[in-house]
Image (tube, rainbow, N blue to C red):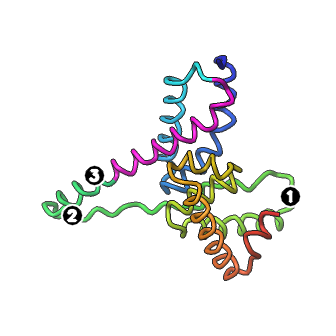
Amino acid sequence: MASSQELSDFLRDVERRAFKQTAYAVRDDHAAMDIVQDAMLKLADKYPDKPVTEYPMLFQRILQNTMRDFWRRQKVRALWTTLLSSFSTQSDDGEARDPLDTMDVDDGSQNPATQLEGSQTLQVIETALQKLPARQREAFVLRYWEKMSVAETAESMGCSEGSVKTHCSRALHTMAALLAQQGLGTVKELNT
């Protein structure tokens, strides 16, 4: 059984990565923060008696389910908005969000030219990542950024290990092609 301090430490450690993962998935920083906070509350509320070693997988599963709930709500909202908008005389112009705001690259230890190059590289990678289909992006982020095993990723995504391997393989090939078009090396080279 985890103490409240262990739970607090776990949530503090996982918050930033969970936010970035969710921001990539939903492409809205405010919604991503709400989803992460909901997932954290669910973990703290429903599983305080679990050992700390089980928290990473439980949290990932809760986070994935919370994101799915978000998408379901968005789908229903979009349906009703579309139906009701036919009665409206004004068009609703949505404000565009810059998806590249979600990464921090300034750590203060590099010179400006290196920081600019790093920032531009991250922008290219994030743009390529956003072009992946949702399931491929999810598998890619969990496997290569969260460093989960195939089995852990499959459990988190609610699919078979074979599906995870397929999604990851397709994501790697697509990312390699997109990054090569931008003059960057392959994904394999970027991971080393």
CA separation in Å, label 1 and label 3: 46 Å
**Does the magenta segment cover residue 149?**
no
SS label for mark 2: loop
Q: Quadrant of the C terminus?
A: bottom right
Residue 115 drawn at (x, y percent):
79, 62
**Dot 2 amino acid type:** Gln
Report crowding for label 3: few under 14, some 14 to 19, many 20 or more residues within 10 A (C-alpha). Answer: few
| SS class, disc 1 | loop
Q: Is residue 140 left or right of residue 105?
A: left
Query: Between 163 and 64, which is closer to the camera in this rendering?
Result: 163
Label annotation for residue 90: 2
Pick whichever, 171 or 169, lies toward us: 169
In the rendered image, residue 160, in percent from the top left (x then y), is placed at 54, 54
Disc 2 packing (10 Å; few <14; some 14–19; many ≥20): few
Which sits earlier in the primary sequence, circle 1 or circle 3? 3
Q: Is residue 64 magenta?
A: yes
The N terminus, quarter of image: top right
The residue that disc 1 covers is: 110
Mark nearer the viewer, 1 or 3: 3
Q: Which residues are magenta?
A: 51-74
Of the numbered discs 1 and 2, the one sitting upstream in the chain is 2
Relative side of 36 to 126, left or right? left
